[in-house]
Amino acid sequence: MTPAAFAKLALALEGATQGTHGGHPDFRAGGKVFASIGFKGPDSATVKLTAEQQDMLLATEPAIFKPVTGTWGQRGYTMIHLPAADAQTMKSALTMAWKNVTASSPRAAKPRTPSAPGKSAGRARAG
């Protein structure tokens, strides 16, 4: 897998755009970064996974994936060794990362509690 092929797969995801972050290309959906290229050199990429997704990929493809060092890696950010990767594995990893940033958060999906009838949401006026 080349950086250009990785970029092509990332940009094929719905609404994905390319930007820059920290001096290297990144890929965003809904304004949120889900992947990047070149974080640790030209043959590297990263994806934003959940801890469970990261564990699965580390167990099944240890030659391709490893956690980013430190706290970021503990949060699911996963390093990819591009020369060892194939298109199907990258498409799967990128799709997981894309879904992680495009899925509605539970907070955003939670309905607002309506005010009691006759009560104003603001402060009462003296008058």
Image (spheres, rainbow, N blue to C red):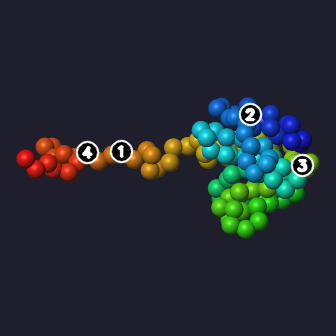
Disc 3 from disc 4: Cα separation: 52 Å
Q: Residues within 10 Å of mark 1 (few under 14, many from 20)?
A: few
Amino acid type of the residue tagged 2 in the rendering: Leu
Amino acid type of the residue tagged 1 in the rendering: Pro
Provide the residue designation for mark 4: 114
Could you tell me if the residues under marks 4 and 1 are in contact, i.e. CB atoms within 8 Å? no
Disc 4 from disc 1: Cα separation: 9 Å
Looking at marks 4 and 2 on the same chain, the residue that comes earlier in the sequence is marked by 2
Q: Is residue 34 visible?
A: yes
Q: Which mark is residue 11?
A: 2
Quadrant of residue 102 in the image? top right
Q: Residues within 10 Å of mark 4 (few under 14, many from 20)?
A: few
The answer to whether 107 appears left or right of 97 in the picture is left
Looking at marks 3 and 1 on the same chain, the residue that comes earlier in the sequence is marked by 3
Provide the residue designation for mark 1: 111
Q: Residues within 10 Å of mark 2 (few under 14, many from 20)?
A: some
Which residue is depicted at the point 10% across and 50% down? 126
Disc 4 from disc 2: Cα separation: 40 Å
Residue furthest out toward the bottom: 70
Instruction: State the residue in front, 94 or 59.
Output: 94
Looking at marks 2 and 1 on the same chain, the residue that comes earlier in the sequence is marked by 2
Provide the residue designation for mark 3: 42
Q: Secondary structure at mark 3?
A: loop
Could you tell me if the residues under marks 3 and 4 are in contact, i.e. CB atoms within 8 Å? no
Query: Does 94 appear above or below 58?
Result: above
Amino acid type of the residue tagged 4 in the rendering: Pro
Disc 2 from disc 3: Cα separation: 18 Å
Disc 2 from disc 1: Cα separation: 33 Å
